[in-house]
Image (cartoon, helix red, strand yellow):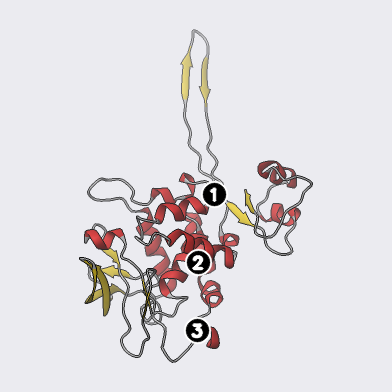
Amino acid sequence: MVIRTRSERHIKKTVENKSVFKHALPLAGIAMVLTPTIISLVPSTVSADETGVYNAQNLINQISSAASEIANQNDLYASVMIAQALLESGNGSSVLSNAPYYNLFGVKSYNGGATVWLPTQEYLNGQWVTMTEPFRQYNSYYESLIDHANVLLASSTVTGQARYAGAWKSQTSSYYDATAYLTGRYATDPSYNQKLNSLIQRYNLTQYDTPSYYNQTTTTTTTTTNTTTTTTSTYQATTTYTVVQGDTLWAIAQKYSISVDQLVAQNNISGELIVVGQQLTI
């Protein structure tokens, strides 16, 4: 198992939305390795890479469609959501993330409903302490993803401000901004964004991000004797795409329903040359 430093919500021990992220220890037969990342549960006698059961791509295949749908509907990056699920569940190997719990993000429960009590380690007063805590139980990964989106959209009951607005599509220029904002807020691990970025790039998770447009209309009315003038401004959010082997400008443009000329102009591409790993702004 891998253990991460607690999120800001853990340290403050504030339960504002009746959901707190923690990470459960194994019930039995789990090997534990301490590093400042997250808690995941991997059987000590089985290697995930050897069996393929806990291969990251398997989890991606299971949740990518739902994550893309949910993220697009909620002004979020599917790429970041999927990367967080991989990181927090140990590629789907944690006890909590598997049936019958389906809790990909280690969400704690204080408001009743289906709950499972599991041992967990919390970093308190400079040391790791083992506690038994209630975790939310879902009927599917879809429900877990929906709840995670709700956490990222929720406002503080104390300040009334959205806690993670800096990770929304409409408030960022790319997923890099979103993962950077989550670091130190969602998780105290100072390298949290680097780990998420690495997963996003390794598995080309930006392919699950969809363009999102948000209209912000400002109306200015000027009245003269016979004329009324109304001015409307529109804001368009952007997304990014990471070039993979075999990509062409035409194929990428088709994917996002824009012209090749637009794609070239937006990214200052010279000679229509793109390379693997290049980040394109759409």
Q: Quadrant of the N terminus?
A: bottom left
Give the secondary structure at mark 3.
Answer: helix
Cβ–Cβ under 8 Å for marks 3 and 2: no
Sooner in the amino-acid sequence: mark 3 or mark 1: 3
Q: Nearer the viewer, mark 3 or mark 1?
A: 3
C-alpha separation, residue under disc 3 versus residue under disc 2? 24 Å
* Amino acid bearing label 3: Ala
Sooner in the amino-acid sequence: mark 2 or mark 1: 2
Give the secondary structure at mark 1.
Answer: loop
- The residue labelled by disc 1 is 212
* Amino acid bearing label 1: Ser
Toward the viewer: 24 or 208?
24
Q: Is residue 217 visible?
A: yes
C-alpha separation, residue under disc 2 versus residue under disc 1? 16 Å
Percent position (x, y) of residue 28? 32, 89
Q: Is residue 116 visible?
A: no
The disc placed on residue 66 is 2
Cβ–Cβ under 8 Å for marks 3 and 1: no
The disc placed on residue 185 is none
**Residue at (62% x, 55% y) in the render:** 241
Toward the viewer: 274 or 235?
274
- Name the outermost residue toward the front: 126
- The residue labelled by disc 3 is 48
- Using a 10 Å C-alpha cutoff, classify the residue at mark 1 as few (fewer than 14 neighbours), some (14 to 19) or many (20 or more): some
Query: Is residue 205 toward the left or the right of residue 156 in the image?
Result: right
Residue 138, located in which quarter of the rendered image? bottom left
C-alpha separation, residue under disc 3 versus residue under disc 1? 35 Å
